[in-house]
Amino acid sequence: MASSTDFPQPKYVTGGCLCQSLTYRIDFPDNYDFKKGSLTCQCTQCRKNTGSFFFPSQNVPQSAFRWTSPDTTTLGRYNATPEGERGFCTKCGSFLYWRHANLDAERIGVAVGTVDPLFLFGEGADGTQVPKGGFGRILSNGEGGHLWCDNEIPGITDKMEFLQTGRRWPKSDE
Ligand SMILES: [Zn+2]
Ligand SMILES: [Zn+2]
């Protein structure tokens, strides 16, 4: 089985919310560790926030992330707990990032599902800038860790091979 590091790695990706009021770009630093940065979470907060059984994120340095939309007036922030800031679009509802307010404020956990289709799975790619197939596999390899595996849904998330590989935490990593 191929290691995730065998997959092509992007120098940058773009993404945004569903209505495109909020768009962003991530420029990955040299030697960026795509393995360490890839997390998933099955906590109830992330489930409610995303509407999905698990939340895949890529946790990049804050300095690598920048907004590219003309403004960020539709950016809403919600704290389910004092330490966790959740960024979303107030117009279309897209959940865009999770950020630790205290421990890890220099990193931002970008919701990988909001990366643009060109970069995520190579939609429209001609193979020059972005390889056919895109960068989804390296952006979400899961090897940084799977959080809140105690909350696995029997028959569904506990049967997903992707969620069974790499480091698994019963709750969070704290
Ligand atoms: Zn939006
Ligand atoms: Zn979570």
Image: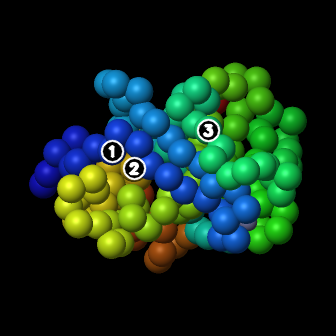
Tell me the crowding category of disc 3: few under 14, some 14 to 19, or many 20 or more residues within 10 angstroms, Cα based. Answer: few
- Is label 1 within 8 A of ligand 1 (CB to nearest ligand atom)? no
Q: Left or right: 79 with respect to 134?
A: right
Q: Quadrant of ligand 1?
A: bottom right
Residue at the location (20% across, 61% down)? Answer: 127
Figure check: 135 above or below 122: above
| Residue identifier under label 1 | 10
* Quadrant in which residue 168 is drawn: top left
Precedes in sequence: disc 3 or disc 1:
1
User: Nearer the N terminus, badge 2 or badge 3?
Assistant: 3
Q: Dot 2: few (<14), some (14–19), or many (≥20) neighbours within 10 Å?
A: many
What amino acid is labelled 2 in the image? Answer: Leu
Determine which of the numbered discs, if any, sits on residue 66 in the image: 3
Q: Earlier in the sequence, mark 1 or mark 2?
A: 1
Judge left or right: residue 74 versus residue 166.
Answer: right
Q: Residue at x 82, y 68 (%)?
A: 91
Q: Quadrant of the C terminus?
A: top right
Residue at mark 1 to residue at mark 2: CA–CA distance: 9 Å
Q: For the residue marked with disc 1, what is the amino acid?
A: Pro
The answer to whether the residues at label 3 and label 1 have Cβ atoms under 8 Å apart is no
Query: Could you tell me if the residues under marks 1 and 2 are in contact, i.e. CB atoms within 8 Å?
Result: yes
Q: Position of residue 28 (x, y in %)?
A: 42, 34
Q: Name the side, left or right, on which 15 lies relative to 117.
A: right
Badge 2 marks a residue whose secondary structure is helix
Residue 29: % across, % down: 41, 27
Q: CA distance from mark 3 to mark 1?
A: 16 Å
Residue 44 visible in the picture: no
Secondary element at image label 3: strand
Identify the residue at image location x=21%, y=49%.
Answer: 7
Q: Say above or below: 54 vs 171.
A: below
